[in-house]
């Protein structure tokens, strides 16, 4: 499967809790746009999970991350998803769109999109 590339920042929590990823725009010191970082993670499969299906403690951590994420950063995440045909296709097959994705997790080649 195609390599997923996106500008991302990961918040990892140890001992089994996945690393949730949200798009982040790094502030530029010169005022010029900064090109996105490249991710070399190969995505082998894609899953979609509704946030309501997660354990309360994991859901609370995602809610906190989402609350601290700007609209611009969330838009960047969703644009990255839309630019990845495999991810957009999986969402569409489930009757969803990137607009419903609030976070992603990439672990062991599995892209998990968390939706509302």
Image: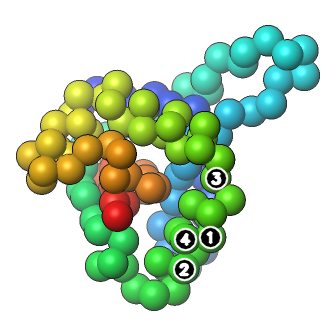
Q: In the image, is 20 to the left or to the right of 28?
A: left
Q: Up-down: is 55 above or below 110? A: below
Q: Is the C-beta separation of discs 2 and 4 under 8 Å?
A: yes
Q: Up-down: is 40 above or below 70? A: above
At numbered mark 2, what does the secondary structure look like: helix, strand or loop? Answer: helix
Cα separation between marks 2 and 3: 14 Å
Of residues 11 and 76, the one nearer the viewer is 76
Which residue position holds label 4?
A: 63
Mark 1 surroundings within 10 Å by alpha-carbon count, few (fewer than 14), some (14 through 19), many (20 or more): few
Q: Is the C-beta separation of discs 1 and 2 under 8 Å?
A: yes
Which residue position holds label 1?
A: 64
Circle on res. 69: 3
Where on the picture, by quarter, is residue 31?
top right
Cα separation between marks 4 and 1: 4 Å
At numbered mark 4, what does the secondary structure look like: helix, strand or loop? Answer: helix
Which residue position holds label 2?
A: 60
Task: Name the residue located 53 percent from the left edge and 44 percent from the top edge.
Answer: 74
At numbered mark 1, what does the secondary structure look like: helix, strand or loop? Answer: helix
Of residues 115 and 13, the one nearer the viewer is 115
Mark 4 surroundings within 10 Å by alpha-carbon count, few (fewer than 14), some (14 through 19), many (20 or more): some
Task: Name the residue located 68 percent from the left edge and 33 percent from the top edge.
Answer: 25
Chain-order first, disc 2 or disc 3: 2
């Amino acid at each position: 499967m195609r390599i997923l590339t996106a500008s991302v920042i990961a918040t990892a929590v140890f001992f089994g809790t996945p690393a949730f990823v949200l798009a982040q725009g790094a502030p530029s010191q010169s005022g010029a746009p900064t090109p996105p970082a490249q991710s070399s993670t190969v995505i082998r499969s894609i899953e979609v999970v509704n946030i309501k299906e997660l354990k309360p403690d994991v859901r609370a951590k995602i809610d906190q991350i989402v609350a601290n994420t700007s609209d611009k950063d969330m838009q960047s995440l969703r644009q990255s998803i839309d630019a990845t045909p495999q991810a957009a296709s999986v969402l569409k097959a489930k009757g969803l769109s990137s607009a419903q994705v609030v976070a992603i997790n990439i672990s062991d080649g599995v892209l998990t999109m968390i939706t509302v």
